[in-house]
Structures are given as structure tokens and as C-alpha cells.
Image: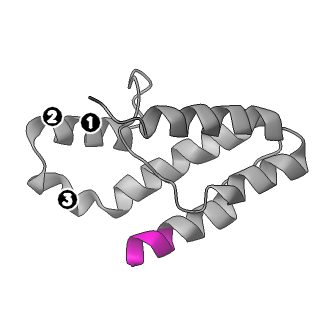
Amino acid sequence: MVTSRLARSWFDSDIGGFTWNDMMEDITQVIGDMHRTHNYLLPFLEDAERTEFTRILNKDPTLPGLNIVLIDEYDAPLDKAYNKGYYHTAMEFFGSLFSSLLKVSQ
């Protein structure tokens, strides 16, 4: 699948950084890059989805959160975090992220 290959390529090479803040900037960049790669979808989105998609493209700092789940290759950023000395911070973030994203609503 092309999307999986693109995500793997971005996560393998671009997510890392020497600090946790660097890693968060990298994650934001990857999500924006994925949206730019697939901006051809804009005409097919509902108004609310198009607004959110555009806000992500424009790196809107007031965006409260993202409704995107990227799980493929989660171990690559954690491996880099381990090697750079901020593994526990990254683990807390990804653990909380996955816990929140993967909860089943009743």
C-alpha cells in the first residue's frame, strides 16, 4: 500500500530529534506532509472535514487536537527516543495517545 510505504518512509527517516520537543515538531511535520500528499481529497470531504484538513495543512496553532491515528512504525520513534535519552517521556506520550485513541465508545 502506498500510504503505508509513505508513512514508513517518513517515520523511519524524519521522526527523531535530540529532544522531546524536536520529536513533537517532527510528528507535526509528518502529519502535515501526509495531508499535503493527499490534498487531492479536499473536494470529496464534508465541510467540517475540509475545515479541519485545511487547518492541519496551515499548521493552525489553535487546532485542539487531531483525529488521525498513525500506528504503523510506532517503534521507530521510540527507538530513537531511547537512543537520545528521552524514552520515558516519549513512552508516556505514545501510551497515553494510543490509550485515548483506541478506546471504544459505548
Residue that mark 1 sits on: 52
Q: Name the residue under label 3.
A: 41
What's the CA distance linking mark 2 and mark 1?
A: 6 Å
Element at badge 1?
A: helix
Please give the name of the residue rendered at 57% of the width and 64% of the height, measured from the top-left corner.
Answer: 10
User: Left or right: where does residue 53 sit relative to residue 82?
Assistant: left
Q: Principal SS element in the magenta part?
A: helix
Q: Alpha-carbon neighbours of circle 3 within 10 Å: few (<14), some, or many (≥20)?
A: few
SS category of the residue bearing label 2: helix
Whole-Å distance between the Cαs marked 3 and 2?
Answer: 14 Å
Residue ID at (41%, 28%): 65
> Does the magenta portion include 5?
yes
- The picture places residue 59, in percent across and down from the top left corner, at 42, 36
Q: For the C terminus, which image quadrant?
A: top left
Residue at (53% x, 61% y) in the render? 72
Chain part drawn in magenta: 1-6
Total of numbered circles in the picture? 3
Q: Name the residue under label 2.
A: 48
| Quadrant in which the N terminus is drawn | bottom left
Q: Are marks 2 and 1 in contact (CB under 8 Å)?
A: yes
Q: In x, y percent, where is residue 88?
A: 80, 35
Determine if the magenta segment contains residue 51.
no
The amino acid type found where label 3 is placed reads Leu
Q: Of the two numbered discs 1 and 3 on the same chain, state the one appearing first in sequence.
A: 3
Q: Is residue 101 above or below residue 16?
A: above
